[in-house]
Image (spheres, rainbow, N blue to C red):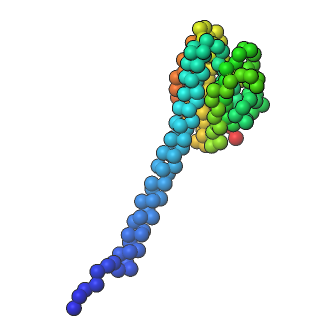
Amino acid sequence: MCKAAGMTLVELLTALAAFAVLATLAAPSFRTLHLNSRRTAVVNGFLHTVFLARSEAIKRGLVVSVCRSSDGQRCDPGVDWSTGWIVFVNRDRDVPPLRDTAEELIFSSGGWPGGSITSNRRAYSFRPVTQLDVNGTIVFCDARGSAHARAIIISHTGRPRVAQRDADNKPLRCPSG
């Protein structure tokens, strides 16, 4: 007589219970990993936007601006940075920067619907030689709040860096609500 190969009902239920316990323990780690990777992708995307604007200003010998945008075509100071932003050649050097139809659009981003992006400046304009007053701080927050926020701090020379604290070495603050 052959003995049937397989599992008994008790063995199957024990394996399913063990799997359920392990999945319950692992779920918070996967959520943290997911939130960290989304935040990192957005921060790096904005960081590359700043590098792009800075290098295009030098390459073209013209002012290149980064501003908030809801449609990916024009500056929209009435929206949050998390809605999106554009990079364009600001030929008329207007302050605050507004993209006219004759000004070339270099890059457009759809923003970050999963979090908030705040800045102490309405826009950033990079010049080919001297930067004058480019400095600012852009803070990226997700549902976890200030403890997990990241910032891009742009120096007077236009050089950006990623930080976990603000320019005065104080904790980052996320908008409440």
- Viewer-proximal residue, 128 or 146? 128
Q: Residue at x 42, y 59 (%)?
A: 22
Question: Where is residue 104 drawn, in percent x and y?
Answer: 68, 24
Q: Quadrant of residue 85?
A: top right
Query: The N terminus lies in which quarter of the figure?
Result: bottom left
Q: Is residue 22 left or right of residue 48?
A: left
Q: Is residue 116 visible?
A: no
Q: Return the residue nearer the eye: 43 or 28.
A: 43
Q: Is residue 87 above or below residue 25?
A: above
Q: How many marks?
A: 0
Q: Please say if 17 is above or below 150.
A: below
Tell me where residue 171 appears, x and y as whole percent: 57, 27
Would you identify the image quadrant in which residue 2 lies? Answer: bottom left
Residue 167 lies, in percent from the top left, at: 57, 20
In the picture, measured across the screen, residue 27 lies left or right of residue 116, that is left
- Residue 155 lies left or right of residue 90; in this view the side is left
Q: Quadrant of the C terminus?
A: top right
Q: Quadrant of residue 52?
A: top right
Question: Could you say where residue 56 lies in the image, as x and y percent from the top left?
Answer: 58, 19
Residue lying at the far front of the rendered structure: 102
Between 86 and 34, the one lying in front of the other is 86
Q: Residue furthest bottom?
A: 1
